[in-house]
Image (cartoon, helix red, strand yellow):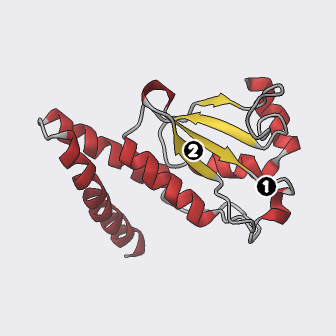
Amino acid sequence: MEADWIAIQDKNPLIVKIVEKYASYWEETVITSIHRKKTTDSGVHEDWRGIDIRANDKPHNCVIETVSEMNSYFQRKDGKLVAIAHGDGANFHVHIQTPIDGEDGMKKKYEPKKTAIKAGEITVSASAIGGLLLLFGVDPQIITFLTPIALGIYKAIVNYIKNR
């Protein structure tokens, strides 16, 4: 897997930017698949245009929110998504994929933004909030509802501190 990660940095720098942005939301990111030999799927892994990332170890609603943010940030000209969360149970994962023509298939060029506060701190806090609520016996359905609200409050506080 490590050799594939090194290889894809030259073969598809765009997918590396997308994966690094996704990883910035989490304390830990585990890539489960990069390059595959010929398969019956669309061929994105065979062409070094697809990466799978473990998501079954994170709160489902936080993964869905992160994927949505990724698709808002990285927009393809063909309207397809760069990030898809799918699978059930132990197979729940995020699939990242890029257009055949790489950066040319995107609506704009993407350069990493330099910020004092990393997005990972915010999302890890969302996970921590969900974990704390679970510890106090809050029903998981309610946690799904409460975590984004708590995250919004946390982001407002962080922005206030950052801008004062």
Residue 118 x %, y %: 50, 55
Residue 121, can we see it? no
Q: Quadrant of residue 51?
A: top right
The residue depicted at 47 percent of the width and 39 percent of the height is 27
Residue ID for mark 2: 23
Task: Reply above or below: 101 against 97.
Answer: below
Q: Quadrant of residue 46?
A: top right
105 and 19: which is toward the camera: 105
Which one is in front in this view, the residue at disc 2 or the one at disc 1?
1
Which quarter of the figure is the N terminus placed in? top right
The residue depicted at 74 percent of the width and 48 percent of the height is 15
Q: CA distance from mark 2 to mark 1?
A: 20 Å
User: Horizontal placement of 19 versus 8: left or right?
Assistant: left
Which quarter of the figure is the C terminus placed in? bottom left
Q: Residues within 10 Å of mark 2 (few under 14, many from 20)?
A: some
The residue depicted at 52 percent of the width and 44 percent of the height is 85
Residue 160 x %, y %: 34, 72
Query: Which sits earlier in the primary sequence, circle 2 or circle 1?
Result: 2
Could you tell me how many numbered marks the image carries?
2
Residue 79, can we see it? yes
Q: Are marks 2 and 1 in contact (CB under 8 Å)?
A: no
User: Horizontal placement of 118 versus 152: left or right?
Assistant: right
Mark 1 is on which residue type? Pro
Residue ID for mark 1: 99
